[in-house]
Image: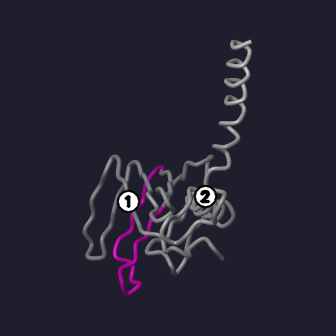
Amino acid sequence: MRNRLSFFAIASLALLVPAILSLRGRAAPPTASAPSADTKVDVESYLYSQLRQHGQIKDPKLSISIYVQKLQGRKLVKPILKRKDAQGVIDWVAHANAAELTVLAGGSQIRVHMQQVVVNGENGSQCSFADKYFVFDVPTDFARK
């Protein structure tokens, strides 16, 4: 009798634990001080949908603009990244063979990982990288349109 009770208790836990874990974070809406994991997915989905539909991400709320020749899954083919300074003037442009865009935890930053990169500065300077990460801040209200 005791073995059956233990078996049923373990079986019940095995069924309940995944259900409880799937509800994690759904009891209360996310607050501004604690962004949810869904925020990251929302921003990343929005950015990739812009690249798929328009071939670019160009938004006045962002300090960067991204242009792509095409997408292959998550891979950006022949991306061009333009960064604007505080006055909205483009201060450098990066061209690459390939890149991947990732929104970091909480959706507060975009990371662009570029391969075979050439960066041109506003003063005519130029530098090359085999592999380079660029990280940019995302405004809290960016993907909530």
Q: Are marks 1 and 2 in contact (CB under 8 Å)?
A: no
Q: Which residue is at 40% across, 77% downward?
A: 84
x, y (%) of residue 51? 61, 62
Q: On the rendered image, what quadrant is the C terminus found in?
A: bottom right
Q: Which residue is at 63% across, 66% downward?
A: 29
Name the residue furthest front.
1
Q: Is residue 69 left or right of residue 14?
A: left
The tag on residue 134 is 1
Query: What's drawn in magenta, residue-wise?
Result: 80-98
**Front position among marks 1 and 2:** 2
Q: Quadrant of residue 15?
A: top right
For this rendering, which residue is in front, 20 or 80?
Answer: 20
Q: Quadrant of residue 18?
A: top right
Secondary structure of the residue carrying numbered label 1: strand
Name the residue furthest bottom.
87
Can you say whether 12 is above or below 103 in the image?
above
Q: Which residue is mark 2?
A: 38
